Image (cartoon, rainbow, N blue to C red):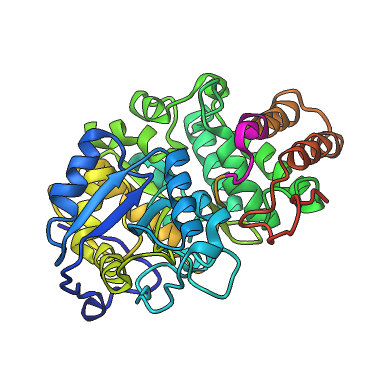
């Protein structure tokens, strides 16, 4: 049986017909750089395109340098750009408006991100990766009455964790709080945005204080060994945890080894929405593209369902549109794909992007969230005092980086304010 990726708006197949073009189009990308991915992009993803295309991957530095040189010269060879959201943010003025591309099949929240705070469509979402939750199927019997697994709230997650704790006599929620765990991404992209609609500006707000109080309730039903957990697939397989949160890549082994035992689902929603952190890649067209029609044809082609599936096979990044996944996809892809689609296509979806503009200070930014967790949850220090203290550290870091706000925070002209 094929797995259906359910996004808010379904694909109109007739709107995504590729156009044959004669000119060669240079696809200049920061993504699919590993040799095997580059080869797959050329031989599997782009082989059906109705015109000549050259796929050339590049590290971020040379990618930006070449693009800026062509923009400054007023002409160039690059026809289509592929990159992560953050790579586009400083180049908005040099990107053509893609409003004419039919992107109705893409989740509305992603489309808005592609505008980069302007009235024009500066890039079109291309592919995504993210984090999901996973559970042993035996845990489903302890879900709160009336709860929808694909649309849980944080209150329902806490009740579920409490039910499992009571029934088994042990805390069964698992969290990647170990040294190599990605706990900071949960706080940055999931918990805090769901309560504050912010990652930075409302860091010390009353709503943020409420979010940490909620997490303390969840922690009461969390396996205390979670401070040693980094890859939650291991705890699912061993049974040390029945319900967990982690990146899709860190859950894959559980689904692939025992596909009938586990289910993936979206992270919960809070009062402000269903915060989630997509690793979002997009495609754009520089204003200096030598053949604008050919570039637009390639962008349209990359949104075709068959192309999106081929891209998933080539890169392990998931589609941004509604597609039927073939039966031969790994179990981890089938499971995570449905959860990712339910997340990004949810009515209350709130994308919270990876930090943008921090440069070498990105590690310190993450550490602020890790320190906040350790002080509030592990050391049980007063939430308000910790948030006030950590907000000062966050403000100094943002000011030093001169980093403007990124989603879900409101765009800022200067450094993102920490209220």
Q: Is residue 300 left or right of residue 250?
A: left
Q: Quadrant of the N terminus?
A: bottom left
Asked if residue 363 is among those painted magenta in the image, a careful observer would answer: yes
Q: Is residue 403 above or below residue 297?
A: above
Q: Is residue 353 above or below residue 112?
A: above
Asked if residue 253 is among those painted magenta in the image, a careful observer would answer: no
- Residue 390 in percent (x, y) is at 79, 35
Q: How many marks?
A: 0
Residue 185: quadrant of the picture? top right
- Residue 138 in percent (x, y) is at 35, 40
Q: Is residue 3 visible?
A: no
**What residue is drawn where x is 71% and y is 28%?**
371
- Residue 406 in percent (x, y) is at 63, 54
Q: Is residue 308 left or right of residue 274?
A: left
**What residue is drawn where x is 44% and y is 57%?**
343
| Front in this rendered view, residue 163 or 197 | 197
**What residue is drawn where x is 47% and y is 47%?**
64
Q: Is residue 190 visible?
A: yes
**What residue is drawn where x is 74% and y is 48%?**
208
Q: Is residue 150 above or below residue 368?
A: below
- Hey, which residue is sitting farthest front in the picture? 73
The segment highlighted magenta reads: 355-365
| Front in this rendered view, residue 99 or 407 | 99
Q: Is residue 322 left or right of residue 124?
A: left
- Residue 274 in percent (x, y) is at 55, 58
| Front in this rendered view, residue 362 or 64 | 64
Q: Is residue 98 left or right of residue 197?
A: left
């Amino acid at each position: 049986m094929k797995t259906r990726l359910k996004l808010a708006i379904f694909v109109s197949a007739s709107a995504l017909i590729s156009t044959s073009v004669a000119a060669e189009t240079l696809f200049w990308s920061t993504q699919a750089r590993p040799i095997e991915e580059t080869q797959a992009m050329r031989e599997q993803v782009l082989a059906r395109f109705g015109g000549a295309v050259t796929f050339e991957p590049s590290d971020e530095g040379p990618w930006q340098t070449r693009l800026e040189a062509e923009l400054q010269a007023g002409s160039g060879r690059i026809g289509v750009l592929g990159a992560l959201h953050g790579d586009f943010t400083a180049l908005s003025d040099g990107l053509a408006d893609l409003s004419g591309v039919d992107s109705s099949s893409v989740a509305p929240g992603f489309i808005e991100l592609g505008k980069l705070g302007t009235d024009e469509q500066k890039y079109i979402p291309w592919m995504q990766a993210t984090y999901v939750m996973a559970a042993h199927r035996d845990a489903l019997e302890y879900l709160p009455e009336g709860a929808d697994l694909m649309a849980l709230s944080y209150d329902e997650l806490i009740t579920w964790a409490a039910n499992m704790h009571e029934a088994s006599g042990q805390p069964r929620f698992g969290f990647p709080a170990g040294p190599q765990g990605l706990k900071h991404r949960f706080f940055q992209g999931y918990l805090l945005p769901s309560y504050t609609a912010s990652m930075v500006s409302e860091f010390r707000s009353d709503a943020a204080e409420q979010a940490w109080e909620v997490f303390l309730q969840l922690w009461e039903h969390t396996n205390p060994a979670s401070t040693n957990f980094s890859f939650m697939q291991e705890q699912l397989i061993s049974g040390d945890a029945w319900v967990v949160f982690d990146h899709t890549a860190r859950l894959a082994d559980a689904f692939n080894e025992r596909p009938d035992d586990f289910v993936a689902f979206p992270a919960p929603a809070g009062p402000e929405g269903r915060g989630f952190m997509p690793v979002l890649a997009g495609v754009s067209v520089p204003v200096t593209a030598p053949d604008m029609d050919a570039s637009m044809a390639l962008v349209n082609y990359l949104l075709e369902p068959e192309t999106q599936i081929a891209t998933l096979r080539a890169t392990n990044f998931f589609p941004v549109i509604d597609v039927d996944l073939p039966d031969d996809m790994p179990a981890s892809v089938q499971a995570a794909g449905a959860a990712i689609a339910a997340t990004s296509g949810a009515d209350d979806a709130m994308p919270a992007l990876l930090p943008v503009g921090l440069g070498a200070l990105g590690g310190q930014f993450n550490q602020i969230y890790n320190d906040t967790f350790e002080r509030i949850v592990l050391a049980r220090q007063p939430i308000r005092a910790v948030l006030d203290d950590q907000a000062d550290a966050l403000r100094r870091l943002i000011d030093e980086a001169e980093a403007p706000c990124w989603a879900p925070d409101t765009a800022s002209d200067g450094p993102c304010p920490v209220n």
